[in-house]
Image (cartoon, rainbow, N blue to C red):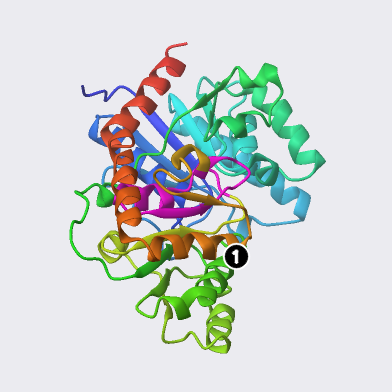
Amino acid sequence: MKNSSRHIAFYIGSLSKGGAERVFVNLAQYFLEKGYRVTMVTQYQRENEYALPAGATRVISDITPEEEGGRIGNFFRRFGKLRRIFKETGADLVLSTFGKNNLMAICTNAFLPTKVVVSVVAEPKEEYAGRLMRFLAKTLFYFADGIVMQTKEAVRFFPKSLQKKCVILKNSVNPAFVRPRFVGERQQEIVAVGRVDANKNHRMAIRAFASIAGRFPQSCLTIYGEGELRQQLLEEIRQLGMADRISMPGAVTDVADRIEKAYAFVLTSFSEGMPNTLLEAMSLGLPCISTDCPCGGPRDLIEDGANGFLTPVDDAAALAERLAALLGDARLADEMGRRAAALQQEYLPEKVNASWEAYFAGIIGK
């Protein structure tokens, strides 16, 4: 049903390539197709961003160099500019995400008719690190019209009185990963996808693979992604004598095509909310091994030993053991992959996005 009378605004730092950014772009596309007006408010505009869907309006909220002054003055200038944007936009509902953006969305829409829904996409204790940020989140979130969380465990960050306002909404799988599972011979390629930074902890995958590579001479490890640690990890790979077995091609745009025939997927993060890369790999039917992150996202997707493996955070020896189990038993790997692929139906975009729309309609109608 077309709904041109409704107007949804999204508020996020930028559209740089990341999980939360892609979710926002996908939701924007869905609401546009449903006939909603859509405004994307970002604090910055960066290079290498997701493309905004045709028909959506983009507004940059950060102050310009000409508007800058002292530090305290700049905060109030940013606050005032963002409030003017929301006031002039006149959206029925604003969806914001991540840390300070959520706090700003609540405050700058105070006493405006616009409904505000905040979303917490990472481990809450890290997203709101420090006493002040936690106090502000646990206080200001009472003034939000809705709170979207990723996992049941994340909800427990808030006092019980706030937990009542929380709802868990899924992230839809990227349409590029919605395809039949590849059936055929798989080379023993282990893959990982994600920003090459400290949190993603690709070093764990490198060391785990290096420790078992001699037992499986036909195997290799490919890590897709860019980030500040890439050169450092390439040097470590060289020092381990693994340059011919471990590759880091950098960021690519055709991830689904590159990994759909892989043997297995690994996620080695210290912390995740609901990891989109893991969901995508499972949707393709890859047997997956993930660290059991504190926020519980991987645990919500993987039933350990059935449709994948969970390992302790930063435990390269445990990861090596699980990799060896898969590489040494093609039947086990195939069975896990087939069970993982069943997750695709639960996270189809049309199902998940419709649940977001229904939730927003309930908030707007209050």
Whether residue 46 is visible, yes or no, is no
Residue 280 horizontal side relative to residue 248, left or right: left
Among the 4 quarters of the image, the one containing residue 118: top right
Q: Where is residue 259 in the image (x, y as percent from the top left)?
A: 31, 63
Q: In this view, does 29 lie above or below 143?
A: below
Q: Position of residue 214 (x, y in %)?
A: 47, 81
Residue 304 horizontal side relative to residue 65, left or right: left
The residue at the point 46 percent across, 18 percent down is 363
Magenta-highlighted residues: 272-298
Where disc 1 sits, the SS reads helix
Whether residue 243 is visible, yes or no, is yes
The residue at the point 58 percent across, 19 percent down is 165
Q: Is residue 126 above or below residue 10?
A: below
Give the residue type at disc 1: Ala
Q: Considering depth in this image, is 6 or 158 the residue closer to the camera?
A: 158
The residue at the point 63 percent across, 44 percent down is 294
Q: Where is residue 239 in the image (x, y as percent from the top left)?
A: 58, 88
Q: In which quarter of the image is the N terminus?
A: top left
Q: Where is residue 75 in the image (x, y as percent from the top left)?
A: 70, 47
Task: Examine the structure image and report whether residue 168 is included in the region drawn in magenta.
Answer: no
Among the 4 quarters of the image, the one containing residue 215: bottom left
Residue 70 horizontal side relative to residue 357, left or right: right
Q: Is residue 123 above or below residue 193?
A: above
Q: Considering depth in this image, is 342 or 254 the residue closer to the camera?
A: 342
Q: Considering depth in this image, is 301 or 224 the residue closer to the camera?
A: 301
Could you classify mark 1 by the number of other residues whose Cα lies within 10 Å: few (under 14), some (14-19), or many (20 or more)?
Answer: many
Count how many numbered circles sit on residues in the image. 1
Instruction: Single out the residue that lies furthest toward the right.
Output: 131
The residue at the point 49 percent across, 37 percent down is 300
Task: Examine the structure image and report whether residue 284 is included in the region drawn in magenta.
Answer: yes
Q: Would you name the residue on which mark 1 appears?
A: 316
